[in-house]
Amino acid sequence: MYISFEAGRRARAILAWVLACMVGGLFLTAPLAVPMGAGYDGENVLASLVVLLMAIIYTLVLTAIPALVLVHLVRWFGWRRGIADVAVPAGILLAFSALITPTDGNQAGSWLPVLLSVVAGIAGFAYWHFAGRPRAPY
């Protein structure tokens, strides 16, 4: 069976995106899942796994189209991949979540954009590693 180079690259990119969403979901739900599973009760562990699975699915659904757009923007502008794969998702999520998070600066929600931005940066870094650390030219 012959798989073309381009098809292999696309498959690796898709697998890297799925794995990066899993890493992002893990980092996003870890503060919630650890206290739930602290008692090692079967129900608490199951609830932790359900929360993790829902976060991964949520991340996959919400990042599908933006990921495609960002890949094309990075290639079009010729940005360095390692930096772009971390900074672009983190910056976009920081700006977007800052716009939709209603806070007056004194609430705990004012840290939400920063937290989401850090998780996006971690997931972008994971994507870059899982994709084989690609560099320009593509």
Image (spheres, helix red, strand yellow):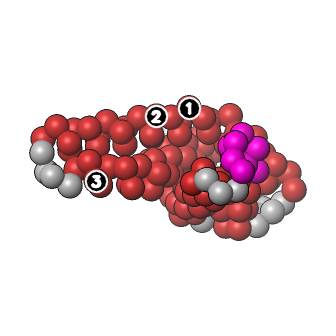
Q: Residue at left 20%, top 42%? A: 44
Residue placed under numbered mark 3 in the picture? 35
Q: Residue at left 50%, top 46%? A: 21
| Residue 85 % position (x, y) | 67, 59
Between tags 1 and 3, which lies in front? 3
Report the residue that reaches farthest toward the right: 77
Q: Distance between the residues labelled 1 and 2?
A: 6 Å
Instruction: Describe the element under mark 2 as helix, strand or loop.
Output: helix
First to last magenta residue range: 95-104
Q: Does label 1 or label 3 sit earlier along the sequence?
A: 3
| Residue 46 % position (x, y) | 22, 38
Give the class, few, some or many, for how many residues have Cα within 10 Å of label 1's Cα (few <14, many ≥20): few
Question: CB under 8 Å between callouts 1 and 2?
Answer: yes
Instruction: Describe the element under mark 3 as helix, strand or loop.
Output: helix
Q: In the displayed structure, does residue 51 sit left or right of residue 64? A: left
| Near-viewer residue (131 or 73) | 73
Residue placed under numbered mark 2 in the picture? 57
Q: In the displayed structure, does residue 61 sit left or right of residue 84? A: left
Q: Distance between the residues labelled 2 and 3?
A: 21 Å
| Near-viewer residue (12 or 128) | 128
Residue 15: in magenta span: no
Q: Main secondary structure of the magenta part?
A: helix
